[in-house]
Image (spheres, rainbow, N blue to C red):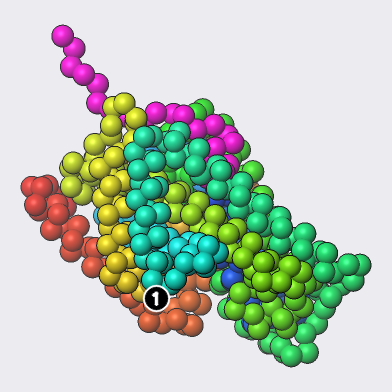
Amino acid sequence: MPAPQPAHYLRRLGTWDAAMIVIGGVIGAGIFRTPAAVAKSTSSGMEVIILWTLGGLLTLAGVLCYAELGARRPQAGGTYVYLREAFGQLPAFLFGWTMALINYPGSVAAVATTFADYATRAIGLPHEWVKPVAVAAIAFIVAVNLFGIRAGAWVQNIFTVLKLGAVAMLIAVGLYLARGHLGVAFAEDPTHDVPASMLIGALLPAMFAYGGFHYLNDLAGEVRDPQRTLPRALGLGMASVVVCYVLVNIAYMAGLGHAGLAASTAPAADLMRRVFGESGATIIAVGIACSTFGYCSIAIAGGARVLQVMSADGMFFRPIARIDAKTGAPQIALLALGAWAIALILSGSFEALVDYTTVGEWLSHAFGIATIFWYRRKLKDEPSPYLVPGYPWVPLIFTTVVLCVIVATAITQPQNAGMSLLIIAIGVPVFFLWRKRLGKKA
């Protein structure tokens, strides 16, 4: 009698599902808040639009690179797999240590709390309900994903469409307020005379708002016809995000003006309030709640796959490597990641973790995309169904700009950058101790 085959991931995601994952992984709460930070560091609406466009183009360059990597290695785990194959187990472990164990659950805890904050305000619950609602949201998302990627994608698609509806509403309201004098959106702001040298600082929050495009690669093992679907979905999804972000910022400045946007702590609510009053602020609160809920769903699904692949490599607890034969879901990894995120919510320690690991996340993007050079050199005889256009300049420009952004972050936020690097460094002795525990040679 032949031995039973081990359970594996099931390829159930089509192009539409994959594109929704890209859009949902990028659009969270950032576009509803971050534009104010960009406006504070600029002198005109035109500069704001240029920065958001530039950030989008740079991110598209990164997405093109991830499209080639995903087409070459259409496996669950994404960046972890690329780093392991190109640079070895230690860099891959440091990625997993920083992202799957700290950044993913930390960001899920933070965004779930944001969801609960907006949701409770929208339905009139007291602030004391925020933590219970956030915990319930994570528990619900984990429970749905236990039934497999199709169930998770069904929920994700609904909330991605709802968040796109919220974005479309902001654009429509901003253009309505402009009513024929759209030039105000690009005008100079005499209250903000910012030197050109500070524009790199204004690019930072825009770049971070574009983060999250890598989640689809974490789920590549469940994409149908991945060599064709991954490049299409990544390109379509990210191009849609760039268009949405630029139009939303035009709407903000058309409705609030550059000075009004720079002074706002909640620009989306302020914009909606100008037309619909407090009911408008409530409507957009519901939209932001949908947006953040959708992000949590993607982050939990993607993070669980990285944990599962790490465990299958012996780099984490072996039971977490189990994939359910019926659903094709890494159920123990999902439960572990969800439980850790809930623990962070209850402890209130997630905000520092997210701040501390942001530099690590962008370092992983830089080194992940740098693996393209290894693949092109070492596997030049291995055909790839998709090749990033403009090689080697596209990956080189993206990697260089990301490293410059990291340096700028270290200068402007030395504590957060230092803690991020410290967390990565702590992973080195943990790696060797874990290898020793398994009786392996480092």
Q: Between residues 122 and 393, which one lies in front from this camera angle?
A: 122
Give left or right: position of 60 versus 108.
right
Q: Is mark 1 on a helix, strand or loop?
A: helix
Q: What residue type is labelled 1?
A: Ala
Q: Is residue 210 visible?
A: no
Q: Where is residue 3 in the image (x, y as percent from the top left)?
A: 18, 17
Answer yes or no: is residue 335 visible: yes
Residue found 69% across the figure and 87% down from its top: 194
**Residue at x 8%, y 47% (from the top left corner):** 439
In which quadrant is the N terminus drawn?
top left
Could you say which is closer to the camera, residue 399 or residue 270? 270
Q: Is residue 260 magenta?
A: no
> Residue at 21% across / 49% down in the picture?
315
Residue 94 against residue 391 in the figure, above or below? below
Instruction: In the rendered view, tell whether residue 137 sits above or below residue 383.
Output: below
Pointer 1 residue: 417
How far across and down, in percent of the image, does residue 246 sit? 71, 62
Q: In which quarter of the image is residue 55?
A: bottom right
Q: Crowdedness of circle 1 by 10 Å Cα count: few (<14), some, many (20+)?
A: many
Query: For residue 387, what is the image quadrant?
Result: top right
Name the one closer to the observer, 253 or 282.
Answer: 282
Q: What is the magenta range?
A: 1-22
